[in-house]
Amino acid sequence: MSNQQVVPWYKEITKRQWKALIAAGSGWALDAMDVMLYSMILVHVMNDLQMGQTTAGFLATLTLLSSAVGGILFGMVADRYGRTKSLMISIFVYSLFTFLCGFSQTVTQLAVFRLLLGLGMGGEWVAGAALITETWDAKHRGKAMGLVQSAWAIGYALAAIVAGVISPLWGWRGVFFFGIVPALVAIWIRKGTEEPEIWEKMKKDAAAKEKGKPKLMELFSSKVFRWTLLGAVLSVCAQFGYWGLFTWIPTYLGSPIEKGGAGLDIMKSTTWIVIMQSGAWLGYVSFGFLADKIGRRKTFILFFALAALLVPFYGMSGDPTWLLILGPFVAFFGSGYFSGFGAVLAELFPTEIRATGQGFCYNFGRGIAATAPTVVGFMASSIGLGAAFGFLSISFALAALLVFFFLPETLGKQLN
């Protein structure tokens, strides 16, 4: 019998790796908070600026479209100038323009600020994902991305709390003003977070003239094009379902019953959302641990398939008690799969184009999925939000099929 003692996984993690995790996780949590503040106060913004559901959904679509552009741009910035610099700049951008949303006097002004906010939102994910996947070892990479992705649920819940506390006191404008807070995190990241060693080595070994050029076109070379295509299409399916559902859930909970909503007051809506996001947090973390244990493919299929089954039941139930019970399970499976994207995309692309590949695939999907809030808003005007949610199960089912037929298993792959 071996006397070798099993060391807990967290004791194998270095100080540098923990710093990278905190930097990427805090940036992602505050990204979620700033982006989702809009959804939390949407009912009040619609009343004040005279917006209908279709217009409100279109503004959410604008943010997602610009985030797709931002993700691709910041991916190239991260490959050329570094992961931490790209992360810092993206956080500053989304916090500044969230703050400026509070000054909007017209729908057009709000749309412009939301459009510019999206650039930073898209950039934060790709910079943070590259930083984590290159800093953490293969056997713990899934856990690391799960922990980082779980920060989105914390930020989503924090947005609900901020709106619940500030909105009754200073209105929806005060809620947006709070969005400047993440800028302070950007300053800390600039001082306390190092670039991954693998990126530093790549920059040192590569000829500046050769490697300093943007690498976007290399994603379409014969060597990696199949992964570019698969990553992009999978991202479309996964994100269409998520953004169509979670953009509108706060409005659904807070809208009057006669308008197809659940009729909850602001404190109940906040409570329901916080409880729901506790399920999302567990989903993000669980995905990471499962992906490192049983593989990326099996975990993806499990989460996508169960999301496809649960979402229609959630949409058909207008009863507050059932919404409270089902909410955490819907969020667990309907959000948790995002933890797999950073690790899998990192394992499909080489270092010199890794952030560009992650940024393109993830944000191409986000760009197409940006239509989801508008589609759901349009459908809601005739059949109601709950019924419109059921339509989204198709995208989750398609994602499960894509993984089953086309995604290779990359568990344990060392990056190079």
Image (tube, helix red, strand yellow):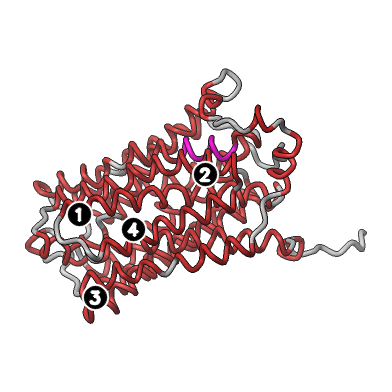
Q: x, y percentage for residue 4?
A: 89, 61
Is 360 in front, or is 392?
360
Q: Secondary structure at mark 1?
A: helix
Q: Which residue is mark 2?
A: 341
Q: x, y percentage for residue 106?
A: 14, 57
Q: Residues within 10 Å of mark 4 (few under 14, many from 20)?
A: many
Which is closer to the viewer, label 3 or label 4? 4
In which quadrant of the rendered view does residue 109 lie? bottom left
As displayed, is residue 59 above or below residue 187? above
Q: Earlier in the sequence, mark 4 or mark 2?
A: 4
Q: Secondary structure at mark 4?
A: helix
Left or right of residue 41: residue 116:
right
Which is closer to the viewer, label 3 or label 1? 1
Kindly report the distance in space between the C-alpha atoms of the residues bearing marks 3 and 1.
20 Å
Q: Which residue is mark 4?
A: 97
Q: Which residue is mark 1?
A: 109
Kindly report the distance in space between the C-alpha atoms of the residues bearing marks 1 and 4.
11 Å
Q: Earlier in the sequence, mark 2 or mark 3?
A: 3
Q: Which residue is mark 3?
A: 167
